Image (cartoon, rainbow, N blue to C red):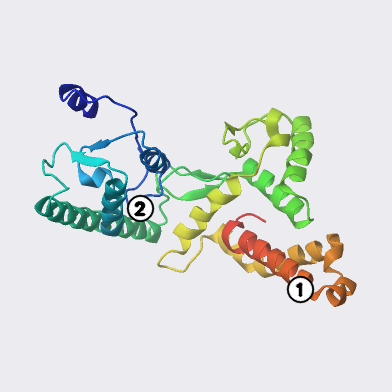
Amino acid sequence: MIKEYCEKNEYDIVDVYNDAGHSGKDLMRPEMQRLLKDIKSKKIDKLVAIKVDRLTRNNYDGFWLLNYCEEHDVKIELMLEPYDVSTANGEMIFGMNLVFGQRERKEIGARTKRAMEEMALERIHPSKAPYGYIRNKETGHLEVEPIEAEVVKEIFELCKQGNSTRGIATIMKVTYTRKGDYLLPDLYLEKGENYGRLGRYEILRLHFIAQNKQALYETLLMTNKLTHHLLLVSDSCENYYEELMGNYIKNDERLSEKNKELNPLEWTKLMNNYKNTAEEIVLNEYVFI
């Protein structure tokens, strides 16, 4: 649609910026950031969008973007909102449309939150189950997948022993190559490539743990109650935290009492870092144990 509009008006298209799948609540979107860099580099002199809410649905960000474009001599042109933003009246209409867009975004957010709360009250999981679970097609509830759960338990046990993610990946590759090749957690390379097979396990990171945050959130939301298998996990969190900290202290010489006396600032900083790591694992990512 935009391309046809530009061709009709004999505009030379420098590039197309499409942030599909990203919310317009702010400007921290990959393609928007690329656009801002191109504006600063003087690569473009006109920004064409369908409507102002395709650029942003935040009042403050909208005026910031308008001023940013003016500073770099870039004109904003909106296909379905034919007004000149460089005039006083045009800027007023631009601001009004921003307000309406921001209001719509907040209303959508509120409706989505209410729907999520209602689903949580009924223990319905709204999306794909995290690794270690299956989603019951009839009830929508999460249920433990026994084989995957054993994998997760083993990974957490290795974590508790003080192994790094790379070390855990190496151990798991050896273990499960012997046991047979079946799908493991969704993992990722630093470059963002997705894999699920054991053959590449040694160079991967453990991404599936983060998926379990959603499971905890949705069962705790509103009711402050956990499903029966998560409740068992919750009861053992304190002990798990203590074991994690004990292993961190045991495996890092910098946390010795001697170093505490010699380098108190370093010791305190390091201890706080380990505490934060342990708390994040226990409170946000701990599902199976």
Which amino acid type corresponds to the residue marked 1 in the rendered image?
Leu
Q: Where's the N terminus, which quadrant?
A: top left
Q: Which residue is mark 2?
A: 26
Question: From the viewer's perspective, is residue 254 above or below residue 209?
Answer: below
Q: Residue at x 67, y 38 (%)?
A: 204
- Mark toward the start of the polypeptide (1 vs 2): 2
Which amino acid type corresponds to the residue marked 2 in the rendered image?
Asp
Q: Where's the C terminus, which quadrant?
A: bottom right
Q: Is residue 133 left or right of residue 171?
A: left
Q: Position of residue 175 (x, y in %)?
A: 78, 37
Q: Nearer the viewer, residue 160 or 126?
A: 160
Q: Residue at x 77, y 44 (%)?
A: 167
Q: Quadrant of residue 115?
A: bottom left
Q: Position of residue 93 (x, y in %)?
A: 12, 53
The reply to whether dot 1 and dot 2 touch (C-beta < 8 Å) is no
Q: Residue at x 45, y 44 (%)?
A: 136
Q: Residue at x 55, y 60 (%)?
A: 228
Rendered image: mark on residue 64: none
* Few, some or many residues within 10 Å of mark 1 (<14, 14–19, 20+): few
Q: Position of residue 73 (x, y in %)?
A: 28, 42
Cα distance between the residues tagged 1 and 2: 38 Å
Q: Which residue is mark 1?
A: 265
Q: Secondary structure at mark 1?
A: helix
